[in-house]
Image (spheres, grey):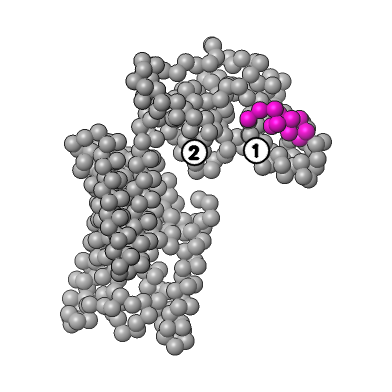
Amino acid sequence: MSWSIKLGRLAGIPLFVHWTFLILLAFIGVRAYAVSGEDLGAALRAVLMVVAVFGCVVLHELGHALMARRFGVPTADITLLPIGGVARLQRIPEKPGQELLVALAGPAVNVVIAAVLVGGLLLSRNDLADMIPSVNLFDPDDNPFATLAFINVFLVLFNLIPAFPMDGGRVLRALLAMAMPYARATRLAATIGQSLAIGFGFLGLVSNPFLLLIALFVWIGAEAEARQVEERVNLQGARIRDAMLTEYHTLAPDDSLGHAASLLLAGSQQDFPVVEDADRQKPVGVLTRSSLMDGLSKAGRDGRVSDFSRPKLGTIEVDAPIVPALARLREGEGPCLQVVDGLQRPIGLLTLENIGEFIMVRTALQGSQAPEARAPVPLPFESGRPDPAARA
């Protein structure tokens, strides 16, 4: 994952930490050192407490991932961020009941952790007063196990707020989806979450400014979730053939950058597949607009395409569904994907822009209630062979 450091694998799932998390640790350490009167031990305790808290966050995300795995939903990775953790499921569970269990699995892990810590404190015969921490990372008098138990309880309560992107928003959506269509349930859950965000915002103005950040976090998360689901609904049943670009240019490795620049200026295409062999049927890379500009600045118009193109161009079959392709493009596999037929011959190009335009067209047709809205988009070529005039 971009800007992240891989720590290893947990239950077979790649575990990453975003580099900004290291800045958080440094800030906590320096802050604790200053508040404690330059006590290095206090700074170390504070850093270790943060690490322990985020260890609980990792277990929380692992709970989601393992429950999703039970329903056949793989997890791409788990990433630690300064604001928490993210388990990237490759898709949402198909049934509302499954999503409900996946959403509850994370908080359930924190409940277990808190119960184990509190049970250990009770067995050690600690006074009840010792089990109520100040939740101050810089207070050496606090029992660290009591502090960690309290934080896990807080994580449960916070995550169960019925608003996206918290688990409570997904719980609410799953419950609503048992009685109404999924997209409508998502929009209703998002609206409820944004209403709560407005409430948090007012409270933040009159009391704790931190609530303003929570309000912004909830508002953006709710809108993003609703938009993502609406997008997925619009792409339901769509295939690569419906959105791919069929009129495009390719380049050979020995072509000049000047030729590529001419093609760039002549049309709207920004990324050019690099293909080789006599019939130009073998994709070997892609020349992006930024790479072309870099090449022109370094080698001029006479530079070779092969010296500045990316060495890999992902491919996807023409009858594959669009949603996985969209995920591949967004995850940074490349600026575009080469569309191939059953014989692995290049017949089209797919970009995020193509998909966005397809969504706009389909949304407009659905809004018109025209018969064409229900008709499949015809394939712009015959017998698996593209129009040779479409690709120079």
Horizontal and vertical percent position of residue 369: 34, 20
Horizontal and vertical percent position of residue 240: 48, 26
Horizontal and vertical percent position of residue 324: 44, 34
Which region of the structure is painted magenta?
257-268
Q: Is residue 270 left or right of residue 261?
A: left
- Is residue 64 at least partly visible in the picture? no
**What residue is drawn where x is 63% and y is 24%?**
248
**What residue is drawn where x is 36% and y is 66%?**
210
**What residue is drawn where x is 21% and y is 66%?**
115
- Marks 2/1 in contact by CB < 8 Å: the verdict is no
**What residue is drawn where x is 32% and y is 65%?**
204
Q: From mark 2 to mark 1, how far is it between C-alphas? A: 17 Å
Q: Which mark is residue 29?
A: none
The residue under label 1 is which amino acid type?
Thr
Indicate whether residue 212 is drawn in magenta. Answer: no
Residue 334's place in the image compared with 199, above or below, is above
Q: Which residue is mark 2?
A: 328
Q: Is residue 12 left or right of residue 105?
A: right
Q: Quadrant of the C terminus?
A: top right
